[in-house]
Image (spheres, grey):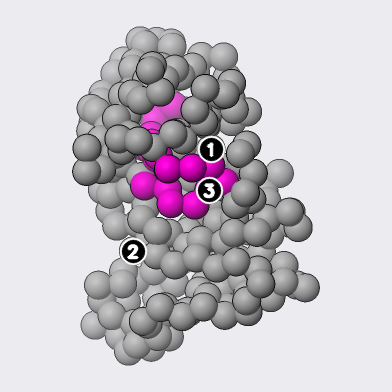
Amino acid sequence: GAGVSQSPSNKVTEKGKDVELRCDPISGHTALYWYRQSLGQGLEFLIYFQGNSAPDKSGLPSDRFSAERTGGSVSTLTIQRTQQEDSAVYLCASSLGSGGSGYTFGSGTRLTVV
Amino acid sequence: QQQVKQSPQSLIVQKGGISIINCAYENTAFDYFPWYQQFPGKGPALLIAIRPDVSEKKEGRFTISFNKSAKQFSLHIMDSQPGDSATYFCAASRLYSSASKIIFGSGTRLSIRP
């Protein structure tokens, strides 16, 4: 596609429920990143996929968070047993190569846990 | 560990004035320093970037000044306009590392008064 697409754009869920957030990267981009942006805060790195390499999961805040990338394209970020502190905007970015250049971000999924 | 420190957290500038945002980094292995601009409800978008082999890069009204010895860099917005009102993030990465992702600063909310 022309840009990075994220769905849903907004998600309200009850505490304790599981949620899945989807990211469709730009076609041909081998690198895919998830970041979290809490209200008025910076961008917190969560996880990074690069081609067929093992993902860099070093930013995942707890074992309730997981992500997968199927076929080197679409990625799903799953949060199990959501907590109120999980409320944030979850941003996905993709790039043609690694190293941090040429990131294109999606518009994010705003997650609210009530 | 906060690898990229950004200041100020918020900034108000009169139309036509100069907006200055400062960042400092710790990891001397970083060799790519982008700035991202984010409007409400949108993902961050690349604004301008610099490599450490130059001390300044200018694109239109936007200039990055880079001080390698001090491990500091800054964004200057000349003739600031109301349309520049946004959140700005400095960032750093290792451009040619296959395992590298962008580390972002905490962001600066810029408001330009008409």
Q: Nearer the viewer, residue B76 or A24?
A: A24
Say whether residue A35 is visible.
yes
The answer to whether tags 3 and 2 share a subunit is: no
**Residue B76 versus residue A81 in the image, above or below:** below
Name which quarter of the figure residue A63 lies in: top right
User: x and y percent of residue B110 in the render?
Assistant: 39, 69
Q: Provide the residue designation for mark 3.
A: A100
Q: Residue furthest front?
A: A28
User: x and y percent of residue A90 in the render?
Assistant: 38, 34
- Which chain is disc 3 placed on? A
Say whether residue B9 is visible.
no
Q: Nearer the viewer, residue A13 or B82?
A: B82
In the shown orientation, is residue A26 left or right of residue B33?
A: left
The disc, 1 or 3, on the residue closer to the chain's N-terminal end is: 1
Query: Which quadrant is the N terminus of chain B positioned in?
Result: top right
Query: Which quadrant is the C terminus of chain B positioned in?
Result: bottom left
Find numbered disc 2 in the image and state the secondary structure of the residue it sits on: strand
Amino acid type shown at disc 3? Gly
Q: Magenta stretch: give its range.
A: A85-104
In the shown orientation, is residue B68 left or right of residue A71?
A: right
Find numbered disc 3 in the image and state the secondary structure of the residue it sits on: loop
Amino acid type shown at disc 2? Ala
